Amino acid sequence: MTRKLTSVILINGEKLYSLTDAYELATGTRPHLSVPWRHSTRGLRGIILESIMAGGKRRTSVKAAQRFFQSLTEAKNQSLPALKVEQTRSSKSRQHAIDRSKESLSAAGV
């Protein structure tokens, strides 16, 4: 599997946060510390979260987290087949269809 780095953080243009803070600001929920760390080092589905080392700590931006999530979504959407939704029938509807089939078979002499 090839690894894909979505783009590069612009140090002068994007405010840097700790990995968990950036995820929390981007999604509204705070992840476990290991999740964004893993995404910034090993990646997920071949996509790596952009991050830099600043002050001895790994940092990223909210925009980088959003780009990461967008890349994951695009990769996932490309791998999914078209969703086929089958409608379920009620037992009454099913019984009605069975009765109609029996009537047509009787009328045909089968």
Image: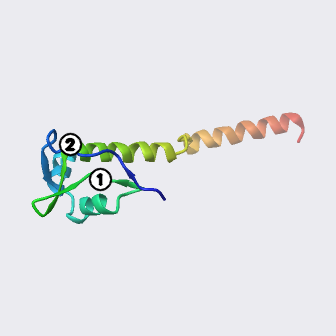
Label 1 or label 2, whichever comes before in sequence order: 2
Of all residues shown, which one is farthest toward the left?
A: 55
Q: Position of residue 71 (x, y in %)?
A: 37, 44
- Structural crowding at the residue carrying mark 2, measured as other residues with C-alpha within 10 Å and reported as few (<14), some (14–19) or many (≥20): few
Judge from the rendering whether residue 51 lies leftward or rightward of residue 69; answer left or right. Answer: left
- Structural crowding at the residue carrying mark 1, measured as other residues with C-alpha within 10 Å and reported as few (<14), some (14–19) or many (≥20): many
Q: Which residue is mark 2?
A: 10
Classify mark 2: helix, strand or loop: loop
Judge from the rendering whether residue 46 lies leftward or rightward of residue 93; answer left or right. Answer: left
Q: Position of residue 7 (x, y in %)?
A: 31, 44
Q: Which mark is residue 49?
A: 1
Judge from the rendering whether residue 82 lies leftward or rightward of residue 40; answer left or right. Answer: right
Judge from the rendering whether residue 10 lies leftward or rightward of residue 85; answer left or right. Answer: left
Classify mark 1: helix, strand or loop: loop
Q: Residue at x 28, y 58 (%)?
A: 40
Of the two numbered discs 1 and 2 in the rendering, the one whose residue sits closer to the viewer: 2
Above or below, 97 relative to 47 = above
Q: Say which quarter of the image contains residue 55.
A: bottom left
